Amino acid sequence: MRPAVLIAAVALALAAPAVAAAPKTFKATLTGATHTPVADNKTKWLYQVKLTDLKGKPLAGKISVAIVDPLGTAHPVQFFLNTTYVTNIPFKGVFKDGVLWPPDSAVGVVLKFQATVVTAKGKVVLIYPVKPHA
């Protein structure tokens, strides 16, 4: 092996631990009632975010929820039957709410239902794909 190749291989091996994934410090999950919500402006679609430490104990954090369209634009989500947006809302353990999908909500198009959770231990963006139907 030539010296330059050997030096590059040693440098790469030494750098590998530095680029390894950071240790996981909490668990967050996003679930929805279905991946195909009814877009009729009257059927409540339920979703839930669960946030725990690695031992399963409830963890405190803040949540922001948005719907990301196919062009990548994020549209903030309002609380069910409320005009307040779910943006930086504090919660501990479980956050539950519902969404009404209007008839003009890109029926037949796959959208990303996105929850961003921030804790003292880090941040995570959770994605739940949905395809509203009439």
Image (cartoon, rainbow, N blue to C red):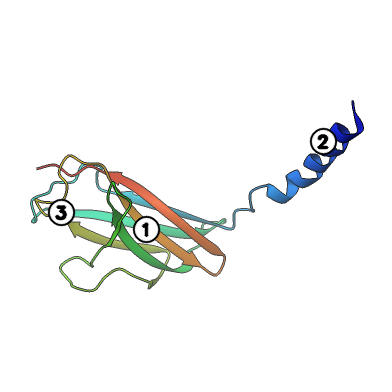
Dot 2: what SS? helix
Determine which residue is flagged by label 1: 115
Instruction: Give the x, y percent position of residue 97.
Output: 26, 62
Q: Residue at x 26, y 70 (%)?
A: 85
Q: Which mark is residue 107?
A: none
Q: Residue at x 25, y 48 (%)?
A: 33
Determine which residue is flagged by label 2: 9
Q: CA distance from mark 3 to mark 2?
A: 54 Å
Residue 51 placement: quadrant: bottom left
Q: Amino acid at mark 3?
A: Trp
Q: Give the left or right position of residue 60, taking residue 20 as reference.
A: left
Q: Amino acid at mark 2?
A: Ala
Mark 1 or mark 3: which comes first in sequence?
A: 3
Q: Residue at x 74, y 44 (%)?
A: 16
Q: Give the left or right position of residue 27, taking residue 111 as reference.
A: right
Which quadrant would the N terminus be assigned to in this image?
top right
